[in-house]
Image: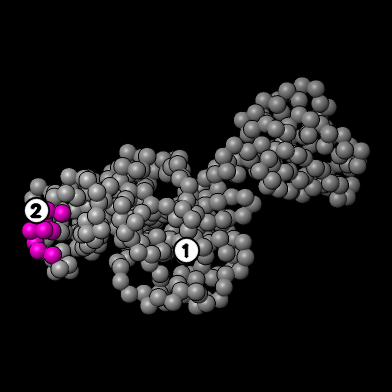
Amino acid sequence: MELTERKKRILRIIVEDYIATAEPVGSKAISAKLELSSATIRNEMADLEELGYLEKPHTSAGRVPSPRGYRLYVNELMEEQRLSLEETRQINQALHTKMQELDRVIDQAGKMVSQLTNYPAFALTGGTGRVVVSRFDLILVDNNSFIAVIMTDSRQVRNKLFRLPNDLTVEQLQMLTTLLNTAFTGKTLEELTPELMRVAEHAAGSSYGLISIVVSFAMECLEDLENRSVYTAGASHLLEHPEYQDVGKAQKLMSYLADAPKLSSLPIPAMGEDNTRILIGPENVAEELKDTSVVLASYDIGDGMKGVIGVVGPTRMDYARVAAKLSCVAEGLSHLFGQELPPAGQDKTTDDGSGGNA
């Protein structure tokens, strides 16, 4: 059955009314917005239900959108929302601070997103996956100190100054550099320890001590690059929505959000052209998220790493509004880690901010 423009208009009204009211939408509410009879609208709603775009709650004559209906709305019917100048200014002011530690910045951004949307928010940082050292360089500073420079296969570079109790020569450093690049490049974090133990059987005591401290530094770098950090905020916002008045249902989702290992293993899908992605109901991989929607936005951390910030809530979510706010925050974070933010208040947004729910 063809999905006509009239059916699409009716579906759009149902989705947006349900987002605003959390109540099933009947033909009377639709006829007030379209010049169609209630009988015609009921027939169209029946067709939409048969096609899987609407669902009929047992206790009501109205209809609610199905996950398939939400997906069509997001893909074709939803108008792009622009934030008001004031909303954009508030976000920029919150991010327009002196550079702080990464965890503090992301934690604050997550709390801000939760407050802006009234949904629980989470953020994942780092997590570049399997990383190996592609090159070691040791640079003599003076007789008692040297700098170890490590480059990974993803072209991240880390360095550290080491001070020693004994003198060190350029020739010794050159020999150690050759050994490190021969034995310890191209190996994963898990492979470095066994290789270090193997080298210990053949290296002299003083040489092994230097090899050990450099390889230990390399292992710290790889662990930092491979691991994701997880931040959550605002889980209690779930209780403000009618869908989670059932404490058992709310508790299940809140427990999931509090489980850092589960969140850190969340597969992050490819983002859309505007750096956002919307996952509706069954499109989510995690079983705990099957009855919810997740809106995600990605941002650049630097050194080839990306982060993701998102919100979780009912499928009755104002997707356009939430996506606009997340995209603005993600863009601000990318500017913060890569360069200075534009002065708060300077923005290309021209909309007056009317319409849409937070």
SS assignment for the magenta stretch, majority: helix
- In the picture, the disc for residue 140 is none
The vertical placement of 227 against 19, above or below, is: above
Q: State the image coordinates of residue 357 (x, y, percent, origin top left).
A: 29, 66
Give the x, y percent position of residue 81: 38, 67
Is 51 on the left-hand or right-hand side of 290? left
Give, as a three-letter code, the residue at label 2. Ser
When asked about the image quadrant of residue 327, the answer is bottom left
Residue 108 visible in this rendered orientation of the protein: no
Residue under label 2: 60
Whole-percent x and y of residue 19? 24, 60
Observer-nearest of 62 and 89:
62
Amino acid type for the residue under numbered disc 1? Val
Q: In this view of the protein, which residue sits in the foreground, 37 or 309? A: 37
Residue under the point 46% across and 69% down: 91
Tell me which numbered mark, 2 or 1, is placed earlier along the sequence: 2
**Dividing the image into 4 quarters, which one contains the N terminus?**
top left
Taking the spot 45% from the left edge, 45% from the top edge, the residue there is 269
Between 272 and 207, the one nearer to me in the picture: 272
* Residue on which the image places disc 1: 329
Q: In the structure shown, which secondary structural element does the residue marked by tag 2 occupy?
A: loop
Q: CA distance from mark 2 to mark 1?
A: 39 Å
Q: Nearer the viewer, residue 310 or 79?
A: 79
Q: Is residue 301 magenta?
A: no
Q: Position of residue 142 (x, y in %)?
A: 88, 50
Q: Is residue 159 visible?
A: yes
The residue tagged with tag 1: helix, strand or loop?
A: helix
For the C terminus, the quadrant is bottom left
Q: Which residues are magenta?
A: 36-44
